Amino acid sequence: MPGSLTLLNGLPKYEVFLEEAKRFPGLDASACYTYLQLLRTGDELLALDEQVLSSYGTRHGRFNLLMMLLKYSDGEATPAGLADKTGVTRATISGLLDGLEKDGLIERRPDPEDRRLIRVHLTAAGQEFLDKIVPGYCRWLSSIVEPLNEKERQQLVMLLEKIRTRLLAVNRRDAERID
């Protein structure tokens, strides 16, 4: 697929993994193939997502941050809290907020009770921007999973959650080894 983020378009066929399993005992051909298929699908989804959001004049990080601000009560969000919630650095959040503020989509104001704190507010222009994007973006998202019926969607979500749970366990185990 054009526009993918990595070089996963030319994945080996399953038979290649079966042959390699003969050379390397313990190699799980099915696991290797499944993992690479999942990685390629995620890669293609991210690339398409960037294209769609770009057609609306935004990027993934900016859009997600604006959507996140919808969850907060007005003035509840802080840059540090947004960085923690998104899992990116405070410097990254500051850069995103700078751009959104320059475009008039958010405002940063000192907290009225503790002037050391900065509060992030979605502006009316920010809300209008989201109102313009969200319906079409959600139609696009829905079109991606349209071939799946409700039961299949639930099953896919359950399977992805199992993989995410495993990722957390692997990350924890690897972090403990490093310490």
Image: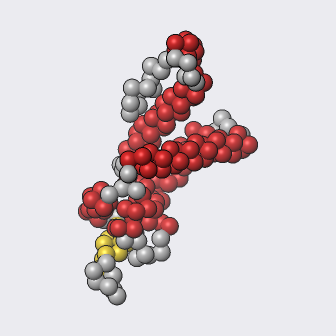
Give the camera-side residue of 43 and 131: 43
Residue 52, position as x, y percentages in the image: 44, 42
Q: Residue furthest bottom?
A: 113
Give the camera-side residue of 8 and 23: 23
Q: Is residue 96 visible?
A: no
Rendered residue at 50%/67% (across/down): 71
Rendered residue at 53%/48% (across/down): 169
Residue 107 placement, left or right of 1: left
- Exactly how many numbered labels are in the figure? 0
Residue 76, position as x, y percentages in the image: 43, 75
Quadrant occupied by the N terminus: top left
Give the camera-side residue of 168 and 102: 168
Residue 30 placement, left or right of 72: right
Q: Is residue 74 visible?
A: yes
Q: Check the image and report above or below for 128 versus 46.
A: below
Residue 37, position as x, y percentages in the image: 53, 28
Residue 53, position as x, y percentages in the image: 41, 46
Rendered residue at 40%/62% (across/down): 84
Q: Check the image and report above or below for 139 versus 4.
A: below
Instruction: Indicate the quadrant where residue 91 lies.
Output: bottom left
Give the camera-side residue of 138 and 132: 138
Instruction: Indicate the quadrant where residue 83 lies.
Output: bottom left
Q: Check the image and report above or below for 86 versus 153.
A: below
